[in-house]
């Protein structure tokens, strides 16, 4: 593939535009203030056109949740020659960057945590009476994470992948939510995550007793 083709912006279909604009509005105003009419107005389409692609707001949030799950599911994959602790830190920084550049993601994740059984869009729970099951890509990610932790921890130190993710990912969600939301000249909504990078590394060092 030529460099020109690789760098050429991907053409978005209407469904992708709806998700993208919903993300932008939710990042700026919050999940609960997301209105489909605002999404339609931002794109320049009629409201029925939104319903032609999604059954409602929760359906759009489900699509947003799928993007989050896909991003998190690709974390903690070691590169050739990379030490386990380097993979852990790099992946954590990658997640911090993803959440900082897409504030709607951490806002949706925090919303999910506010309900004991979680919202369907993020955790794919169809009903409160069904058994909870993580998507396969998330389960695989936790297995990779545990393998890296076991290799990175000093002798005698035991740490589960769930506890690591709770501390590291939980830190990101809370701290990012405390930072001001900013908008670039071209309309991109973001949170300045760079100021949290060094603290994130320190947390990982302490968890692993490195």
Image (cartoon, rainbow, N blue to C red):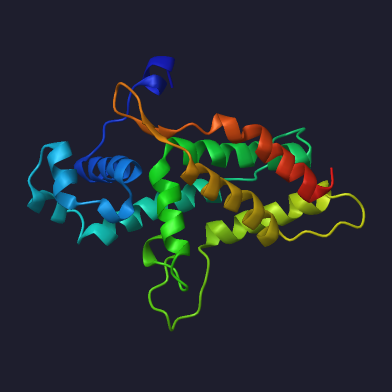
Q: Residue at x 39, y 20 (%)?
A: 7
Q: Quadrant of residue 162?
A: bottom right
Q: Residue at x 78, y 59 (%)?
A: 159
Q: Is residue 193 left or right of residue 42?
A: right
- Give percent across and percent down for residue 42: 17, 38
Relative height, residue 20 to residue 155 (above, below)? above
In the depicted view, which residue is nearer to us: 203 or 57? Answer: 203
Quarter of the image containing the C terminus?
Answer: top right
Q: Residue at x 27, y 31 (%)?
A: 11
Quarter of the image containing the N terminus?
Answer: top left
In the depicted view, which residue is nearer to us: 47 or 183? Answer: 183
- Give percent across and percent down for residue 127: 38, 78
- Give percent across and percent down for residue 88: 70, 43
Relative height, residue 6 to residue 70 (above, below)? above
In the depicted view, which residue is nearer to us: 27 or 84? Answer: 27
- Give percent across and percent down for residue 86: 74, 36
């Amino acid at each position: 593939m030529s460099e020109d083709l690789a760098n050429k912006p991907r053409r978005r279909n209407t469904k992708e535009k709806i998700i993208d604009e919903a993300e932008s509005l939710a990042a700026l105003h919050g999940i609960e203030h997301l209105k489909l009419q605002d999404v339609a107005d931002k794109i320049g389409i009629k409201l029925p056109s939104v319903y032609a692609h999604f059954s409602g707001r929760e359906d759009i949030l489900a699509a947003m949740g799928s993007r989050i799950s896909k991003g998190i599911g690709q974390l903690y994959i070691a590169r050739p020659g990379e030490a386990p602790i380097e993979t852990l830190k790099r992946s954590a920084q990658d997640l911090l960057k993803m959440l900082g550049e897409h504030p709607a993601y951490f806002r949706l994740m925090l919303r999910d945590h506010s309900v004991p059984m979680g919202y369907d869009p993020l955790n794919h729970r169809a009903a409160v009476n069904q058994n909870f099951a993580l998507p396969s890509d998330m389960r695989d990610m936790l297995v990779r994470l545990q393998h890296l932790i076991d290799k990175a921890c000093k002798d005698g130190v035991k740490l589960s992948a769930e506890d690591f993710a709770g501390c590291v990912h939980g830190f990101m969600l809370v701290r990012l939510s405390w930072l001001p939301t900013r908008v670039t000249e071209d309309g991109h909504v973001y949170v300045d995550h760079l100021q949290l990078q060094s603290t994130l590394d320190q947390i990982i060092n302490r968890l692993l007793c490195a």
